[in-house]
Amino acid sequence: MKYYEGFDTVAERYFEEMGYTDERKCLFWLGVIMRVYDFAKGNSRKSPAMDSFHANPNRKSGFSVLMLFQRYASEVPEELAKKFISTYSEKVEEMAPYEKEFDLVGGYVSYSTFVRMGKTFNTFEWMTAAEAEKRWNLNEGTVRAACARGPLAEYVDKGLARKSGGTWLVSDIAMQEVYGDEKKDTI
């Protein structure tokens, strides 16, 4: 079963912009875990994990987040399970059922959308290598070399940098993570 790590960057950016607490992140990652499980079970249109969750009469009066995680944890990649574990605390269980469900469903739907859109959420901006070099005040060829065999190469695997024909395209997320904030022209 495949988990697309490019989603990590999109999710972390979303968490930062929305001011997510660890409790909300925990529930979001649980939703992602349930969707990865569902994708692995066959047709991407089917959703056995979410369907069984919605059919549970206890979901409106209260449900154990940890028990739900344990149900699917062995079926997902370890790096994804670690995201849930690193944000879990007793505070998650104390949340109101509707709050838990809101963030859980948010993670489920967000990951589903990410995969169905070809892992290209429009939460970042694409630019050519030449545009990136100009915006970050880098020497010509720096970004192309970084994408091919340098610090941006890992972002190719994450879907945040790619080659289109003979032109390298890079996301603003990858550029910010490797080169910091965009450099403004100084005269």
Image: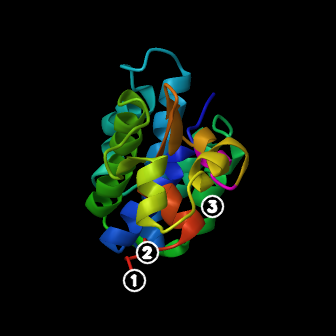
Q: Earlier in the sequence, mark 2 or mark 3?
A: 3
Give the structural element (helix, strand or loop) at label 1. loop
Q: Nearer the viewer, residue 67 or 157?
A: 157
- Residue tagged by mark 1? 186
Asked if the magenta segment contains residue 152, the reply would be yes
Asked if the magenta segment contains residue 63, the reply would be no
Mark 1 and mark 2 residues within 8 Å of each other at the beta carbon: yes
- Residue tagged by mark 3? 85
Camera-side mark, 3 or 1: 1
Q: Residue at x 61, y 31 (%)?
A: 2
Q: Is residue 33 visible?
A: no
Camera-side mark, 1 or 2: 1
Q: Hey, what amino acid is under mark 1?
A: Thr
Residue 98 quadrant = bottom left
Work out which quarter of the rendered image holds the C terminus and state it.
bottom left
Answer with left or right where residue 106 lies relative to residue 22.
left
Q: Earlier in the sequence, mark 3 or mark 1?
A: 3
Mark 3 surroundings within 10 Å by alpha-carbon count, few (fewer than 14), some (14 through 19), many (20 or more): some
Give the color scheme: rainbow, by chain, secondary structure or one colour. rainbow
Give the structural element (helix, strand or loop) at label 3. helix
Residue 123: image location, x then y, percent: 33, 52
Give the structural element (helix, strand or loop) at label 2. loop
Magenta-colored span: 151-155
> Rounded to the nearest whole Å, what is the CA distance between mark 2 and mark 3?
37 Å
